[in-house]
Image (cartoon, rainbow, N blue to C red):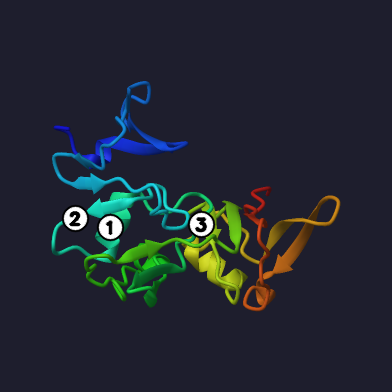
Amino acid sequence: YESDYRDYDILRVDNRFVLQSSKSPEIVDEIPEGVDRIHFADFAVALDLDGVAGEAYRPGTYSVPGVISVFNLLYITGSPTEKGSLRNIYVMRNNKKIAEIDFYQFLLNGNLTNNIKIEDQDVIYFPFYQKHVAVTGAFKRNSVYELQPQENLADLVTMAGGFNDTAFKERVKIFQYGVSQRQIKDVAATDFSTYLPKNGDSVFADKVNESY
C-alpha cells in the first residue's frame, strides 16, 4: 500500500483480516487468506491471529525500525481500546515483565520515564482499566480520566488542569451509581485530598453565582 499505516485500520473479523480506510470507512479491503504481512509506505505489519496483546486498539505483531521506543509503538498501535489501561502498560521480554508504564506521566507532565527501547520479540500488553471517572463543568480540561486505586479527588482535579476562572471552588458534586439508583453527594474542598472516587463516578464543578 502506498499510503502510511496511520491511514488504515486493520480489523479482525472471525479468522480473517480486513483493511479499512480511516479517512473513508466505506472503503474496505479484505486480506486474502495466506497473507501474513502487509507493507505500507512507512511500516510493514505482520498479521498474527494468536498475538493479541490485551486490550490493544490494533493488536498484532509489528515489524518496526531497529530503533523504536515504547511510546513510538503506542502511537503505531493506536494505544488501548476504551476498556484498556493507559496507567499500567506492561512491557514483556522473554515472558517476564521488565517495565510497567504509566502513560499519564507523559501525557500530563511530559515525563519520559520508562520510555525504553523495544527489542525483537518484546510484547506490549494493555490490561483492563480499573477505575474511570468523568470530570464535567467548570474545570479546565473536561474528560474521562483513569485513576489509580490510591489517587484521590485532589489528584483528579489536578489531572483536569484545575478549576477554570468561573468555578465555585469550595465544593464539587459527585454523581455515583448506587445499588439501585444514581446518587448525588457534595464533597467540600477540604476533603478533596482524602476522598477516593469510585469507578463510574462523574465529578461536576459548578460556576460561581453571578447574581448581584
Residue 101, image quadrant: bottom left
Q: Tell me where residue 89 appears, x and y as whole percent.
A: 42, 66
Q: Tell me where residue 104 appears, x and y as whole percent.
A: 42, 65
Tally of numbered discs: 3
Q: CA distance from mark 1 to mark 2?
A: 8 Å
Query: What amino acid does circle 2 point to?
Result: Val
The residue at the far front in this view is 34
| First in sequence: mark 2 vs mark 3 | 2
Q: Residues within 10 Å of mark 2 (few under 14, many from 20)?
A: some
Disc 1 to disc 2: CB gap under 8 Å: yes
Q: CA distance from mark 3 to mark 1?
A: 34 Å
Provide the residue designation for mark 1: 73
Provide the residue designation for mark 2: 64
Provide the residue designation for mark 3: 164
Disc 3 to disc 1: CB gap under 8 Å: no
Q: Residues within 10 Å of mark 1 (few under 14, many from 20)?
A: some
Disc 2 to disc 3: CB gap under 8 Å: no
**Horizontal side of residue 130 vs 160, given as left or right:** right
Q: CA distance from mark 2 to mark 3?
A: 42 Å
Query: What amino acid does circle 3 point to?
Result: Asn
